[in-house]
Amino acid sequence: MKKIVLSAFLVLATMVGVKAQKAGYDPVNAPYGHGEDSVKCLINLSLMSTAAKAEVYQDALEPWEYVYKNCPASSKNIYIYGPRIFKFLHAKETDPAKKKALVDKVMEIYDTRLKYFGNDDPKGTILAYKTYDYMEMMGDEADSKVIYEWLKEAILDMKDKMDPPDAYGYFMVASLTEFLKDEAKKDQYLQDYFMVTGFLDQAIANAKARNDEENVNYLAAVKDGIVQGFISSGAGDCETLTQYYADKIEPNKTNKEFLNEVVIALKTVGCTESDIYFTAAEYLYKLEPSADAAIGLANRSLKNKDYDTAIKYYEEAAKLEPDKDKASEYLYTLAAVLCAQGNYSRARQIAYKSLEYNPNNGKNYILIAQMYAASAGNIFQEPEKRGLVYCAAVDKLQKAKAVDPSVAAEANELINKYSAYFMDTETAFMMGIKEGDTVYIPGWIGENTVVRLK
């Protein structure tokens, strides 16, 4: 009972304020104090740490109070265990006013940590954890404006090195919430989106350079959530972004960072056929050729049906793109365009180039198979042999499944469809062809395949 009464007294003392440390306290040269004070400080630090590590936070409270008041610069553990102690008390408290006072106390602890140990850890990291504890303790009553302001300060401090990285996501949720409460904050939300995704892109590139695949995947997931929120927010549709950037392109035509932002933003929402997108891409390409700028010029060429120029810029984009998977996708898109134009031979050539960047991009093999199947009636003079062309198509579909499990369902569906066009046993016998024979497919295909019969 004595311990409970003492603890209750200490909580009350904490909520009404902290007595300043002794006059003459020197946090730099004597962080533990002097003489008997330093001994008391060390003893209470030990008692605090032992109890807090055992998660007996009620027992940790009294020694924590002593060191926080009398030797606040003596150990960073004061500021690691402090929030845990007061979150424990907060969870047990039922009085709303006292619960709010405990929230304020935790926030004060983080501010004091910045004062005494701000050089030990990045300011942005400390602010992020302060914000997390605020959100945890306040629950549904957390103020999105407070979250926004604290995390924005944290991110501006850390930029592409934000740790913990999920702070990017929490910040954008707060920014979106502020916009949804007040549409006048749309520009603020747009600016926040481009700033954060820019930092994330650099953070992902940094992780790739370190071969840190786990962090790459985590950061990519954070970014994907932010992008999906942006797309569904209503702030980032094509019309809105076009209006937003309409009068900003010309004044910024030599601003590489701004133009890159425009190109990426418009591409994100699928707004790649607007004049603003093309203009920004052209200015950006003149300043510094980049994959995004080259894709913009390629899209303009496609719109103008200038396919030779489009091919040139797609291939240029693949060479400039540091991400091999993206480079492969650029060329796959080009191959699909050429396929739609009926230029099968050139489309296959580009599809194979796409596979040089990413050998596991099975969509290329599916595209080649579809072109083979589309040509089946024109390869052999004897119409009965068209089933052999479908065998070559199935070869590519089997390859697609082997290198890329994500396309297996589509490949299997096409295999079932094309298998119906294989030569039947009787026709094959009459033509001197047997199951398992190797035959040459002439024309633009120019490959061997293994005979399959139905």
Image: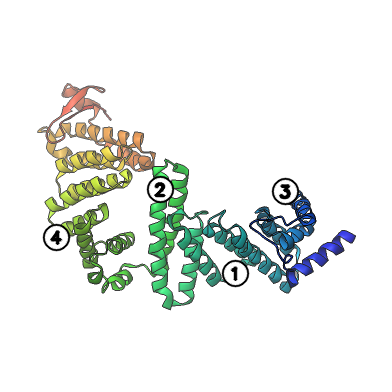
**Residue highlighted by disc 4:** 304
Marks 1 and 2 close (CB-CB < 8 Å): no
Q: Earlier in the sequence, mark 1 or mark 2?
A: 1
Q: Earlier in the sequence, mark 3 or mark 2?
A: 3
**Residue highlighted by disc 2:** 206
Residue 13 screen position, x and y as percent: 78, 69
The Cα–Cα distance between marks 3 and 2, rounded to whole angstroms, is 35 Å
Q: Residues within 10 Å of mark 2 (few under 14, many from 20)?
A: some
Residue 324 as seen in the image, left or right of residue 300: right
> Which residue type carries mark 2?
Asn
The Cα–Cα distance between marks 2 and 4, rounded to whole angstroms, is 38 Å
Instruction: Decide if residue 212 is in sight here.
Output: yes
> Which residue type carries mark 4?
Asn
**Residue highlighted by disc 1:** 142
Please name whichever residue, 108 or 98, is drawn nearer the observer in this view of the structure. Answer: 108
Residue 307 screen position, x and y as percent: 13, 52
> Which residue type carries mark 1?
Ala
**Residue highlighted by disc 3:** 53
Q: Residue at x 17, y 48 (%)?
A: 338
Residue 387 screen position, x and y as percent: 21, 33
The Cα–Cα distance between marks 4 and 3, rounded to whole angstroms, is 68 Å
Q: Earlier in the sequence, mark 3 or mark 1?
A: 3
Q: Residue at x 82, y 67 (%)?
A: 9
The Cα–Cα distance between marks 3 and 1, rounded to whole angstroms, is 29 Å
